[in-house]
Image: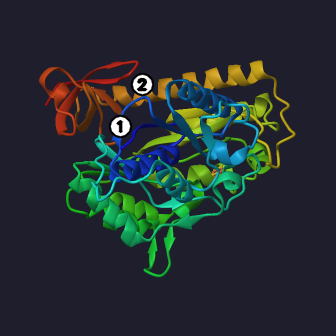
Amino acid sequence: MARFSTRFLGCKVSHTDAQMLRARLLADGHTEGPGEIAVVNTCCVTNEALAKSRQAASRAARSHRHVYVTGCGARLSETAFAGLPENVTVVRGQIEDAVEQIAGDVGAIGCVRADARLQRVRAFVKIQDGCSFACNFCVIPLVRGATRSRSAAAVLAEIRRRVAQGHREIVLTGVNLGCFRDRAAGYRLARLIREAGAVDGVERLRLSSIEINHVDAELVAALRETPVVGPHLHVPLQSGDDHVLRAMGRRYSVATYLRKLEPLADFNLTADVIVGFPAEDDAAFERTLETVRAAGLTKVHVFPYSPRPGTKTAADDTVAPEVKKERGATLRALSDEACRSRWRSKVGREDVVLVDRPGRGYGADYSPWLVPGPIAARIGELVHVRGRAVTGEGIVADAA
Ligand code: SF4
């Protein structure tokens, strides 16, 4: 038996992959703990993410007997992890192969086949991996390959297993969720949402993110007609300027983005935006701010552009770092104000919060709540609350 630890950098897919590795090692009879085996599932979406991944691997090498480096960073670059100590192994295959390789190296413990319980209220269930969109700046198709889906039966079985383990909220994750297809069984994303939401014991269901191209009447109906789906959707924008969107190789205009979100005007809409893309001048950035306002976005995850090797824009990086920084700060300030404005609208109103950490949780629309006194410790429970005030971190609740 070995003691192991897993950590991930980057997005929810990276988190899900790290959990897959963790579940396999637990199922093979190993236990979590420090000192022996570390798995670092890396990210390469920006230069900074890759540098942090290397630092994490280097730190782990000092405190563990052996370290496995997996994930997008490991797949992108031979050199990114060169020169690390000899106890570091870089595993470059896709996650399924990486799991097999690492599990084979570490070794299984006889007949132990426990079903690993993940100690979170929320379970991330991967339905799809890879992307065939090929946006000009994006390294994901290079490191994760073309889109491919799990079968609907496998996804629904995993959801049933997670619920049996005690998870209350299911988040369907993938790199490009709208590409999910199970042709043999006749599923697209909308049908999967309806059936996942009908699994006994699922109290909340969310999508990790969805491209605007995939927001259509069928999807909107599935979101609205599935009672456990809350009014929240994360829809990457990347830029609010048509010229920049074209230069990015995105497949929509600003008008399309706004039009497709119209039926979801009451939803808490969140997005990713890249600042400092080569074609982005001051006027284009202003149009991005206008678009964020017009779409009614609240939380905007801001990414300063950094060119990634192997992409179409690998050689372009014309916006000065201080301009990227300033634009990022302006956009974050706009996003903070939009969040506070939504949170203020909940003062005096009731909501149901899923408590996921001591004193904290998320409401139906994924707004953050701070829950007081006796209900603060009811982790994993849905609690009825009433908004009392707003702080920089969320809505302060009274028990309703
Ligand atoms: S849709 Fe574009 S940005 Fe998103 S993963 Fe695919 S290529 Fe990358």
Residue ID at (60%, 35%)? 87
- Left or right: residue 85 versus residue 301 is right
Label 2: element kind: helix
Give the label, 1 or 2, closer to the camera. Answer: 1
User: What is the x, y in percent for residue 118?
Assistant: 31, 45
Label 1: element kind: strand
Viewer can see residue 215? no
Q: In the picture shown, does residue 176 fall above or below 398?
A: below
Q: In the picture shown, does residue 148 fall above or below 364?
A: below
- Left or right: residue 35 versus residue 45 is left
Residue 89, quarter of the rendered image: top right
User: What is the x, y in percent for residue 26?
Assistant: 35, 48
**Label 2 crowd bin: few (<14), some (14–19), many (20+), radius 10 Å:** some
- Left or right: residue 179 versus residue 369 is right
User: What is the x, y in percent for residue 56?
Assistant: 57, 29
Determine which of the numbered discs, if any, sits on residue 340 in the image.
Answer: 2
User: What is the x, y in percent for residue 134?
Assistant: 72, 56
Residue 212, quarter of the rendered image: bottom right
Viewer can see residue 102? yes
Residue ID at (23%, 25%)? 371
Q: Which residue type carries mark 2? A: Arg
**In the image shown, does 30 or 157 lie closer to the viewer?**
30
- Location of the C terminus (image quadrant): top left
**Label 1 crowd bin: few (<14), some (14–19), many (20+), radius 10 Å:** some
Determine which of the numbered discs, if any, sits on residue 32 in the image.
Answer: 1
Residue most extreme to the bottom = 184
